[in-house]
Amino acid sequence: MKNFESLLAAYLVAWAVFFIFEIRIARSVARLREELEHLKETLEN
Amino acid sequence: MHRNGSFRFELSGTLAVAALMGVAGYAVFFLAPTERTMGEIQRIFYFHVASAWTAFLAFFIVFVANLNYLMRRRPVWDQLAVAAAEVGIAFCTVVLLTGPIWAKPVWGIWWTWDARLTSTFVLWLLYVGYLLLRSLVEDPGRRAVTSAVFGIFAFLDVPIVYMSIRWWRTQHPEPVIAGGEGSGLDPTMWRVLLVCLMAMVALLVLLLRQRFRLEQLRGKLEELRLHIGAKPTPRF
């Protein structure tokens, strides 16, 4: 199949963009939750 | 119990989107007919075009949320706008990356500064600028107003991108959908495109929901920080 590598590359690139985006959101949520807990503790003390 | 229910809902939503993406992938590779002149590489069309339309939808959400913020001044609209802008950038990035991979074997070049390609790149830059602008303003109220005004103007590029291949002669192919006489798409190709579009829109909803929740969390944190007089968290 001619140009199949390019087709596959485009498909993988699209998936990679969404995957990286998803990971970025998950990491930011985890970091902010941690920070929120820390601030709540500071307020309680 | 509530957290468990929410987690199950989240998980089933993610699995449903993943399944829909799988179906779309199967349709692109195995059900769509091979185009006569370009061959296999034309299959990029399905997720390239679906991503572009989904990016337009995301930027439309930014536009509506920005307008609503300026009218009602409720932070939730600002949070929705920034979430949709980031998701829209992700879809626009897919368009800008898959386009050149398609162009190289067909046109012999990765990129050319024609009206469609340039206006799409400008669209991407405008929304990246929107996010950068937000990182420069510390006061939440001023940040929301400034970025809302910028976001409304940025949306003006969406109709320009859409109409560019109708208004100017470009290297980019003429429209095959709603392109007037002589244009059109094979019925199976249409169905595959619709499946891909559904999958992309489902992915948009999933990502937007998660990104919106992140922004709400950020808002809460900012409020708490202001309350205890701590320094705001850098936005990047």
Image (cartoon, rainbow, N blue to C red):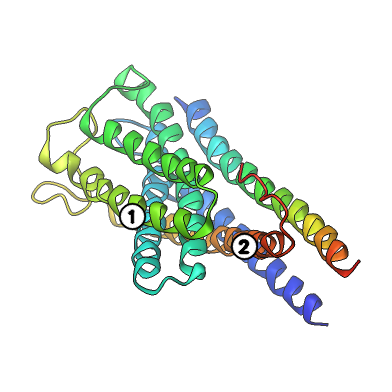
Give the residue number, with chain letter if any, for mark 2.
Answer: B219
Location of mark 1 (residue): B149
| Residue with the most extreme front position | B229
B62 displayed left or right of B119: right
In contact (CB < 8 Å): disc 1 and disc 2: no
User: Relative to residue B114, is residue A30 drawn left or right?
Assistant: right
Q: Chain of mark 2?
A: B
Q: Position of residue B188 (x, y in %)?
A: 35, 55
Which residue does the image show at 69% across and 49% down from the upper left? B231
Q: Quadrant of residue B175?
A: top left
Name which residue type carries label 2: Gly
Residue occupying the point 37% across, 36% down: B42
Q: Nearer the viewer, residue B192 or B118?
A: B118
Say if labels 1 and 2 share a chain.
yes
Residue B112 percent location from the top left of the image: 29, 22
Question: On what subunit does the disc labeled 1 rest?
Answer: B
Residue B192 visible, this angle = no
Q: Is residue B87 visible?
A: yes
The amino acid type found where label 1 is placed reads: Val
Dot 1 or dot 2: first in sequence order is 1
Q: Is residue A6 above or below residue B94?
A: above
Residue B96 position, x and y percent, is 41, 34
Write the residue at 42% across / 70% down: B73
Between B216 and B40, the one nearer to me in the picture: B216
Q: Secondary structure at mark 1?
A: helix
